[in-house]
Image (cartoon, rainbow, N blue to C red):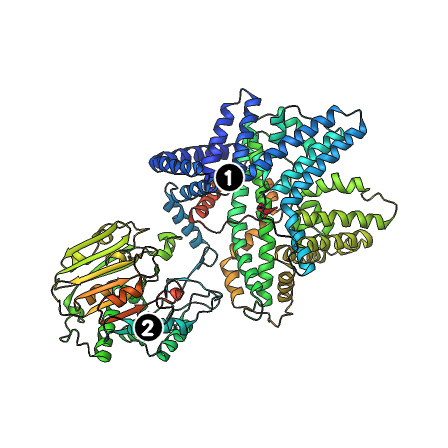
Amino acid sequence: MRKYIFCVIFLFSIFAYSFINIYSNKDKLKAEIKECISLIEKEEVGSAINSFDEYAKSSLYKKMSFIEMYGFFQKLLYKNEINNFEYVKDKDGFLHFTEFYKGIENDYDKYARQVRRLAENAKNPNCKTIFVNPLGLYIENITRINDGYNPAKYDKEQDEFLFNLYENNVKVLDTRKTILEKNKNKEELFYKTDHHWTTQAEFYAFCDIVDYLNENFDANLDSDYYFRDINNYNLKLYKNSFIGSLARKAGIIYSGKDDYLFIEPKEQGKFSYFAHIKDNVEISRSGSFKDAFIVEKFLKDPDTYTEAKHMAYIGEISPYEVLKNEGNSSGPKVLFIRDSYLSASMCFLANLCSEIHSIWPLSENLNFDIEEFVEENDFDYIIVEAYPGNFNEEFFSFYKEAK
Amino acid sequence: MLFSSIVFLFYFLPIVLIVYFLLSFSRFLQNSWLLIVSLIFYAWGEPKNIVIMIGSILFNSVFGLLIEKNRKRKDICKLFLIIAIVLNVSILFVYKYLNFFIENINISQGKEILPILKLSLPIGISFFTFQALSYVIDVYKGKTKAEKNIFKVGLYISFFPQLIAGPIVQYNDIAEQLGNRKVTFRKLSIGCCRFVAGLAKKIILANSMAGLAENIFSWSSIGTHSYVVPSSLAWIGAIAYAFQIYFDFSAYSDMAIGLGLMFGFKFKENFNFPYVSKSISEFWRRWHISLTDWFKEYVYFPLGGSRVKNKDHLARNLLIVWVLTGLWHGAEWTFLVWGVWNFVFILFEKFTKFHLKLEKIPIFSHLYVVFVFVIGWVIFRANDLYQAGLMIMNMFMLNKNGFYSNMVPIILKEYAFIFLMCFVFATPITRKTNEYLMYKKIDGKNSVVYTVFYPVVMMMLFAISVSYLATGSYNPFIYFNF
């Protein structure tokens, strides 16, 4: 009897769910079938099958409910690792990537020389280059996790790279020290479900960059200390408002939601923002700080599972971006060569600059040569930032040879 | 296509089942439908290899008929059988073994004498070739008549539930069912239960163990100069792989048997709790039973089996069977050595009967069997003999690698439940519990609670399995390449 009951429930479930799954995605399914047919006509049957497999996985009806169920099951099992140690959770609930074996030997001296060549070849002979070394999610003596979980630790790689930068006379701002001097509370520096900095940490990084440029290059930025004073900003806390990329495989039940602190200057100023995303896809916005730099949809009603709130500052990183301060034409012109860190810091820094240009070397859609760009544009400062996971040939794609 | 995939569960299976039951008025149409969907199922993995499958169906059908037609002319009959065997084995050899031979010839000569051919291994080629061989040999032996309807031969060779991972069905076991089978609600129900139990075993147990084994074997393969794998960690990896291969393969057999039942077919069991065996001979009577039976029927018995004049012949027959069994799994020296490893222990048991003495103290006989199969699986799993040696040396602290790893307590803590379930489901405990609960009577009635509890638990297992698939968690399948 028990098997008969199960059989009826099971068959009803798979028929009903399959029907709903197909019906709820009918438009997507039609498009996918069209795509598959066109691939088959090109005699790419294998690609058509792979494409349909991917479609089936990604468009599963109520997929996130299943992910939540998975997370709930992992929680029931009292697990601190997810998907075969792809991620681990520390004692304070922060999710970390893991790393068991570093198979890649990076040539840090070569990368350091490449960074040095940026200033050497810049159009402006007085252009200064600094490397901003980001504070990583695993913080020695602060992160609490049992031995054996192997969260990704990058201090050794960072130290080796910084050593080579010093050897090549490249100035370095090591935010591992500077940010922790300001605040050692990890919950205020990192999200539990994402490896990016909180807005607060981004603000600290902005202050550190300004301090560093002033101390080392007499930049004389923010001389009245107005923009480095948090009291001159409006703060808004969004409680339990999003999950970051690290939690997308385990869901909210397992990882919990993160709070989000939004910071915007009280003095809104006048700015413009431009981003080249890919061929024929560009974005421009202008107006106040909020109008130009803040993508409201990430603040107001983001998809909890796919759109992290921290993308509110200029949205997802683009291959090439320009932040202009229309009210400060005499300010310095800065180039950032970076990864997905420093988005908010750049926005804060825009208050003190005339123009900030940002290049994301890892993008396939970057449609110009970085070397030519550096040689043709008159920058006062070039700021390079790379998370250690991006210490690779793809990021350091510029000045591989001396000119 | 994998059974443990979204496409199979929510597109392929419901459509196949609905159309199959709508065609209930005609067995011919039902079989034709199953043949068509089986070919689609096969083509989903590697579309261009569908030609090999169709070719295999065609020429085996033709040779079956030729043998049948010439039954009275024994020489011609034998000639057709030999041609059919040569053709089947040649296809298997070319796609599976030729490059292995070329590689080894080149290595032995120290230069590239012959170029490596760009051939992709057709999925499940060893399974469907053995089924095709079974068909022509059974027809030759007169165990069954040649099938005039090519669709039935096609369905026998390509039937999707057992196409890519068995069980290897012998033709005479299924010939009757192809044309005359009953699809009952009882069969359908048992089939659904079996399928879901297999799916859960595969996704929750086998895949979890697969991740562990994959990590530890890959760390071991880095080499001790760069990455030390302490003994305790190496043992965890080896045991995890032993569980992975058992739950992966037996789960696939469960799903295949379950799917077969849904369509009215009854396949023989392929596993019978091999890890509780008290000898290696017993292990192989419980592990991949359909392959063992196939070799017994078509190789071991024709060679004389155990009823031979002297022990030399017995040893020779066993060696042939075990070398072939090893090579059936793949064209690598590791598989050959693994086959010989099993042969050595089986021969030793046959000659000395020492396992009978061990059986008096069951713990010793179990430890002996576990030791032999765990080491055997390490050889089987390794990419080459060097890696196998490295891993085994790690297990026995012969690489100056020490014993303790700080990862072991973490792994044991994180995988405590999964390991516990692996131990439980690798033994007949659940079957016995199930039987106990099923027949336990309270006040003269079967337990109502269990009747309700069972479907709920099974549906939960199904939902959890789908949740693993939805996250895109690690989902390998070992026997795909065999």
Residue at 78%, 40% in the rendered image: B301
| Residue projecting furthest to the top | B25
Q: Amino acid at mark 2?
A: Arg
Q: Give coordinates of residue A93: x percent, y percent.
A: 37, 62
Could you tell whether A112 is left or right of B29 in the image?
left
Residue ID at (37%, 46%): A64
Front position in the image: B465 or B417: B465
Residue at the image point whose x is 67% and y is 28% from the top? B62
Disc 2 target residue: A117
**Is A353 in front, or is A109?**
A109
The chain letter under disc 2 is A
Crowdedness near tag 1: few (<14), some (14–19) or many (≥20) residues, C-alpha within 10 Å: many
**How far from the left and from the top, in percent, is residue A157?**
41, 72
Q: How many marks?
A: 2
Residue B91: assigned label: none
Q: Chain of mark 1?
A: B
Whether residue A216 appears in this view of the structure is yes
Secondary structure category for the residue under label 1: helix
Asked whether the residues under the numbered discs 1 and 2 touch, taking CB atoms below 8 Å apart as contact, a structural biologist would say no
Look at label 1 and name its amino acid.
Trp
Marks 1, 2 in one chain: no
Mark pair 1, 2: CA separation: 51 Å
Location of mark 1 (residue): B44
Q: Percent position (x, y) of residue B163?
A: 59, 38
